[in-house]
Image (cartoon, grey):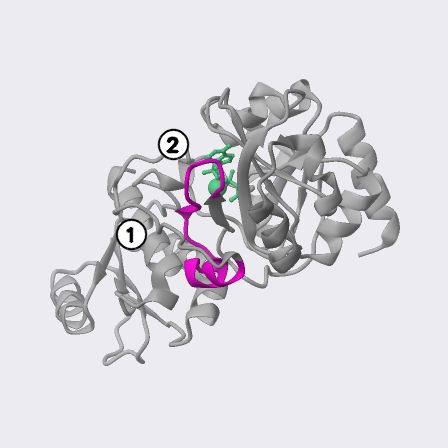
Amino acid sequence: MALNSVAEAADCLRAGELVAFPTETVYGLGADARNPAALAKIFAAKGRPADHPLIVHLPDASHLERWAVDLPEAAFKLAAAFWPGPLTLILKRHPAVSDLVTGGQDTVGLRVPNHPLALALLHEFGNGIAAPSANRFGRISPTTAQHVREELGAAVAMVLDGGPCAVGIESTILDLTAAAPRILRPGAISAAEIARVLGAEVAGQGEYGETMPRVSGSLAAHYAPRTPLQLMAMDELVAAVQQSLAAGRRVAVLAPAPAPLQHTNLLWRVASADFSRFAHDLYATLRELDAAGCDSILVARPPATEPWRAVNDRLQRAAAGSNNA
Ligand code: TXA
Ligand code: MG
């Protein structure tokens, strides 16, 4: 990536245009967080409801006070420990923050992303960049520049290409505005890691399906392919594949073991047994399986253990969302 594209991208942002850029989690659809007309373009491009708040990306933690007030000690500790990195902090908004960013709430989501191109853009721009994941509302988040081009095309003035995202799923969202820190969306940084830094308990995510305070990533139907997706145990899955094939249906599978049979109507992708590798590959693989034109996508349910929490969260939402599509 030539250095002048970063300068060009910063100019686009100053001109009120949208710029998609890589982060370590997923690609973001960026706009000048101080420019309401530019922010409105994000909602139009994504087809996102106007009351869903946006995360503001900052060049570094020294910008915190421009966006949030009443900062708790925990915010500084976590910023020092995890930024740049996949952790979003929900804090009390500064009065200057646009309602388009906060969704009219009295809080704001802030993070410093850990990707050289994102950081170069943020430093060149010198201010906050509001950026949701660069996908249409409710669909699978993009982890390559090509995903963004395919899905948003002309709505974006520029797409900075930083290669595939290292983490692959969205940041952990931690609410620091309540009595105790609480995770609103699980991600690569776990509750245990946060608790270790704070020396305090961290409330986990609510039960699946519970209504969260306007975190669109917490809607049951989210991150969804168009093809119906089901999660099942491995033995169930093999039986379901056999049944589907016998009925003349086309099936796509994501499972940690190699295919037990070959069939022209079967597309089988082997999933990693390592959770961070699984997360890294998840969205690109779901896009590939979705594009294959199968009647269903069957995913072997990963272990129900703590390291797999964020991956299980996204898979459950993908399943719920695909059935509504
Ligand atoms: O990893 C990420 O967080 C990516 C990259 C681009 O940084 N961004 C991302 O943005 O996932 P988005 O908009 O797709 O998801 C952000 C979530 C949304 O569910 C939004 O509702 C929630 O963060 N959010 C933002 N501000 C909030 C606030 N003040 N209170 C509660 N939730 C908030
Ligand atoms: Mg999103």
Relative image position of residue 110 (x, y in whole percent): 60, 40
Q: Classify 260 as above or below 253.
A: below
Relative image position of residue 71 (x, y in whole percent): 61, 37
The local crowd at label 1, few if under 14, some if 14 to 19, many if 20 or more residues have their Cα within 10 Å, is many
Viewer-nearest residue: 187 or 321: 187
- Whether residue 138 is visible: no
Q: Mark 2 or 1 closer to N-term?
A: 2
Report which residue position mark 1 lands on.
Answer: 316
Where is the C terminus found, in terms of image quarters?
top left
Alpha carbon separation for disc pair 2 and 1? 19 Å
- Whether residue 214 is visible: yes
**SS at badge 1:** helix
- Which residue lies at the image location 67% right of the left edge and 21% below the top edge? 96
Relative image position of residue 132 (x, y in whole percent): 55, 38
Is the residue marked 2 within 8 Å of ligand 1, measured from its CB?
yes
- Which residue lies at the image location 49% right of the left edge and 23% below the top edge? 105
**SS at badge 2:** loop
From the viewer's perspective, tell me whether residue 204 is left or right of residue 282.
left
The residue segment tinted magenta is 175-197
Q: Which mark is residue 105?
A: none
- Which residue lies at the image location 61% right of the left edge and 53% below the top edge? 77
Label 1 sits on what residue type?
Gln
Label 2 sits on what residue type?
Pro
> Looking at the image, how many numbered discs can be counted on the residues?
2
Where is the N terminus found, in terms of image quarters?
bottom right
* Camera-nearest label, 2 or 1: 2
Q: Let me know if residue 251 is in the magenta part.
A: no
Report which residue position mark 2 lands on.
Answer: 213
Q: Classify 277 as above or below 89.
A: below
In the displayed orientation, state which residue is furthest to the right. 4
